[in-house]
Image (cartoon, rainbow, N blue to C red):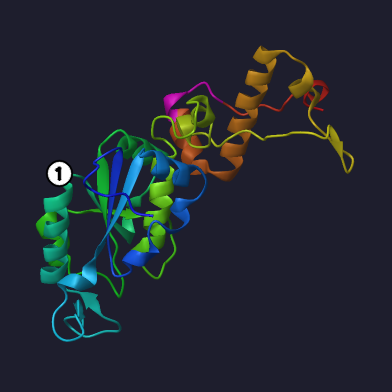
Amino acid sequence: MSTSLAKQVGWQAHIITLFPDMFPGPLNTSLSGRALETGAWACQPHDLRAFGEGRHRAVDDTPAGGGAGMVLRADIASAALADTQNKAGDLPVLLPSPRGVPFTQEMAADLALGKGAIFMCNRFEGVDERFIEAHNLREVSMGDYILSGGEMAAFAMLDAIIRLLPGVMGSSASHDEESFTDDLLEYPQYTRPTSWQGRDIPTILTSGNHGDIAAWRRMRAQEITAARRPDLWARFVARNPSAAPKKPDDKKSG
């Protein structure tokens, strides 16, 4: 499903790609799918191949200096971006790239506050550096691994953004306590049955004392972050010098 640009409702996602039929793909289901139906966001893919040259609409060429693979041409990428910007207006442009800055929850939240974004999805060995320089593109990475193209990264970024749009998740409390809020990973979650395979829900969570529950969750979030993500923990401690993981009360934690 693709929302027409003529409607101009909600947050606008423009994706420049060699595979426009991939979109909205999985984003047409669940929360993002319902948000697409209601107009909270709109998905508009743009076919990069339309700007190619020759009989086969080629968009790439061999790397200068030699080497494996092919490189997306600057002139063709620039023509595709200019056409998209003419239709989309002044929106931030993101280039998914393994050498980019890490995509974060904070970045997703900032983008969700805007009108939309353009995702320049590359394939091959990369894009001509002159294109990146000419347009001062923001290169963004999903992690220290390689994908076949920018489309999968765009899906992940879009999902992270869409769920933060007003009304998509229903209550802002749904994401206020999630991982990466305040540089902490999320605390453990439990639900029925109370006992399962000899493992019980921590008794503090069934105590009804909301103050104790909040303190326990905060403590567990700190412990998990310190153990699993020392980079996040260092940032948290820098902003909260008195913070230090403490062992939960055995009688209360169960």
Secondary structure under tag 1 reads loop
Residue, disc 1: 90
Is-magenta flag for residue 239?
A: yes
Residue that appears at 50% across and 50% down? 29
The vertical placement of 175 against 215, above or below, is below
Q: Nearer the viewer, residue 194 or 80?
A: 80
Q: Is residue 104 left or right of residue 111?
A: right
Residue 100, given in percent of the width and then of the height, sits at 31, 56
The amino acid at mark 1 is Asp
Residue 197, given in percent of the width and then of the height, sits at 88, 44
Residue that appears at 39% across and 34% down? 165
Residue 59, given in percent of the width and then of the height, sits at 19, 76
Residue that appears at 32% across and 53% down? 140
Q: Is residue 218 left or right of residue 62?
A: right
Dominant SS type (magenta): loop
* Magenta span of residues: 238-243
* Quadrant occupied by the C terminus: top right
